[in-house]
Amino acid sequence: MAEAERIIGTPDVDDEAAASAEPPKGKRKIAVLFAVALVAYLLDLGSKLLVVAKLEHHEPIEIIGDWLKFEAVRNPGAAFGMGEAFTIIFTCIAATVIVVIVRLARKLYSGPWAVALGLLLGGALGNLTDRIFRSPGVFEGAVVDFIAPAHFAVFNLADSAIVCGGVLIVLLSFKGLDPDGTVHKD
């Protein structure tokens, strides 16, 4: 009977057991995405709590002379403090990015893409948390920035995660690796 089932194409019990023993490829990558996002988010959240508790309303801390300081800054705008009047728009953009990444996660079969999207998700969640829960009010909150390199904008760990995730996505795209794990050559 088993021979007839193989000829017809019906799997026997051994084939089904072998197929179910392999972990689903997609779920493993989704776990990587959410693990990276969680680590990025918790590092950002923890650093901001520490900065608000210990550094806000105090003198900046010099890390490497004038080259790098930790300085608590509230940023209601986007990068480089631009767009202060559009805080609600940045909040909506961050929320949209989060929804898109979560929806894309269902088709995720690439480890490097999982890391890149996890960094983006964790960073977006970190800054969105500030926009929702920090003063002056819900969806108008200012983001806590504190890493202040000389002659550059002040930023935070969420911003760093977003930039690193974005750079990784560009590199993966140039290599031809798609989120579903396929490689294409143009």
Image (cartoon, helix red, strand yellow):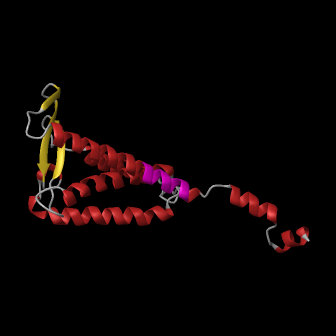
In the image, 158 versus 178, the foreground residue is 158
Q: Determine if residue 9 is in view.
A: yes
Q: Is residue 32 magenta?
A: yes
> Is 104 contained in the magenta span?
no
Quarter assignment of residue 27: bottom right
**Front residue of this view, candidates 158 and 165:** 158
- Say which residue appears at 8% left-offset and 40% top-offset: 57
Query: Which one is in front, 174 or 95?
Result: 95
> Dominant secondary structure of the magenta stretch?
helix
Within the image, what quadrant is residue 152 found in? Answer: top left
Image coordinates of residue 101 in percent, x first then y, are: 39, 61
The answer to whether residue 22 is left or right of residue 41 is right
Up-down relation of residue 38 to residue 72 (above or below)? below
Residue that lies at the very extreme toward the front in this rendered image: 53
In the picture as drawn, the residue positioned furthest to the bottom comes out as: 8
The reply, left or right, for residue 7 in relation to residue 56 is: right
Answer with left or right where residue 4 lies relative to residue 146. right
For the point 32% across and 62% down, the residue is: 97
9 is higher (above) or lower (below) than 143 = below
Give, as a single range, the part of the protein colored magenta. Answer: 27-35
For the N terminus, the quadrant is bottom right
Where in the figure is residue 161, as x and y percent of width and height? 32, 47
